Image (tube, rainbow, N blue to C red):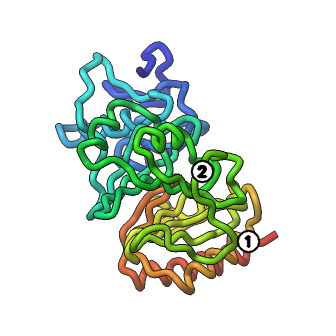
């Protein structure tokens, strides 16, 4: 619950606010950029919501916030059923991000052969009930060590297989399936794991039906730049390796959606997505140490 006594003075005047417990993970302003923004070392309400649709979107940000730092005064009952939030086709945003993963977004993908959870949200009854209705989870796909969060609890509830690259396995020692090396691996029908070492040594992207690309912290969309980006200042293993591995991805993968853990998601024409990724790799190469 947000703390009105810790309301940041930089919030726009009005009912909605972000308190100073915010860790500036970026979840709110990536999800609802028309209302929230980063200011200095945290996020704030930049524009107060006007009307029911904007109010609903503010509630989406509040429900997703890992520190529960977003609120309104006077207090009002939080709507139910905010998440899972439909994104496109079989893909849903699970919200309920975890402070343990610095607010990383996780996803549910509905599949006839068994649903996928890509990275993990907080374990909460607000999600277990709808996931039960949607058929549970057959595979938990971990893009890298930073975004494991409550994956073991979700896997235990649904008896799901857990996939992670062996280079990051210490973050998920109970994982049932280890990816190795740099070769793509089919983990389920239409689902390919592509190792992309760089952000961490064991970073992986997961491509579903050559349409939806789940990128963890290796690739994202920037609202500010209106382009694909990689995070040079949050590259924990090797920028050179990340440049190389994203170049290999550009040469082999076809996708429409970029669905990251951190950063904004975007839907692009496949050719545009390819060309943007090629140009990003070129820019990354010029910034190599």
Q: Earlier in the sequence, mark 1 or mark 2?
A: 2
The C terminus is located in which quarter? bottom right
Identify the disc placed on residue 241.
1
The residue carrying pointer 1 sits among few (fewer than 14), some (14 to 19) or many (20 or more) residues within 10 Å by Cα, namely some
How many discs appear?
2
Percent across and percent down for residue 109 are 35, 58
Q: Quadrant of residue 127?
A: top left
Residue 191 seen in the figure: yes
Residue 232 seen in the figure: no
Question: Is residue 214 shown above or below 149?
Answer: below
Say whether residue 40 is left or right of residue 114: right
Q: Which residue is under mark 2?
A: 175
Percent across and percent down for residue 172 are 63, 46
Percent across and percent down for residue 107 are 40, 52
Mark 1 and mark 2 residues within 8 Å of each other at the beta carbon:
no
The N terminus is located in which quarter? top left
């Amino acid at each position: 619950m947000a703390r009105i006594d810790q309301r940041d003075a930089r919030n726009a005047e009005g009912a909605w606010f972000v308190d100073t417990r915010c860790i500036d993970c970026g979840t709110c302003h990536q999800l609802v950029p028309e209302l929230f923004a980063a200011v200095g070392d945290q996020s704030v309400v930049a524009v107060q919501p006007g009307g029911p649709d904007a109010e609903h979107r503010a509630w989406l940000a509040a429900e997703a916030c890992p520190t529960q730092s977003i609120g309104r005064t006077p207090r009002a009952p939080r709507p139910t059923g905010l998440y899972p939030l439909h994104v496109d086709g079989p893909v849903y945003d699970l919200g309920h991000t975890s402070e343990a993963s610095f607010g990383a977004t996780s996803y549910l993908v509905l599949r006839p052969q068994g649903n996928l959870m890509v990275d993990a949200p907080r374990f909460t009854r607000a999600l277990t009930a709808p996931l039960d209705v949607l058929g549970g989870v057959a595979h938990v796909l971990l893009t890298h060590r930073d975004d494991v969060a409550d994956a073991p609890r979700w896997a235990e509830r649904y008896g799901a297989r857990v996939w992670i690259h062996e280079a990051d396995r210490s973050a998920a020692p109970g994982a049932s399936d280890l990816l190795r090396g740099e070769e793509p691996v089919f983990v389920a029908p239409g689902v390919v794991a592509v190792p992309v070492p760089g952000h961490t040594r064991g970073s992986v992207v997961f491509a579903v039906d050559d349409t939806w690309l789940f990128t963890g912290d290796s690739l994202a969309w920037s609202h500010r730049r209106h382009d694909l980006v990689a995070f040079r200042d949050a590259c924990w293993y090797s920028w050179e390796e990340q440049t190389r591995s994203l170049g290999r991805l550009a040469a082999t993968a076809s996708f429409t959606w970029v669905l990251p853990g951190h950063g904004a998601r975007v839907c692009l024409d496949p050719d545009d997505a390819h060309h943007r990724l090629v140009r990003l790799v070129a820019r990354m190469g010029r910034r190599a140490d």
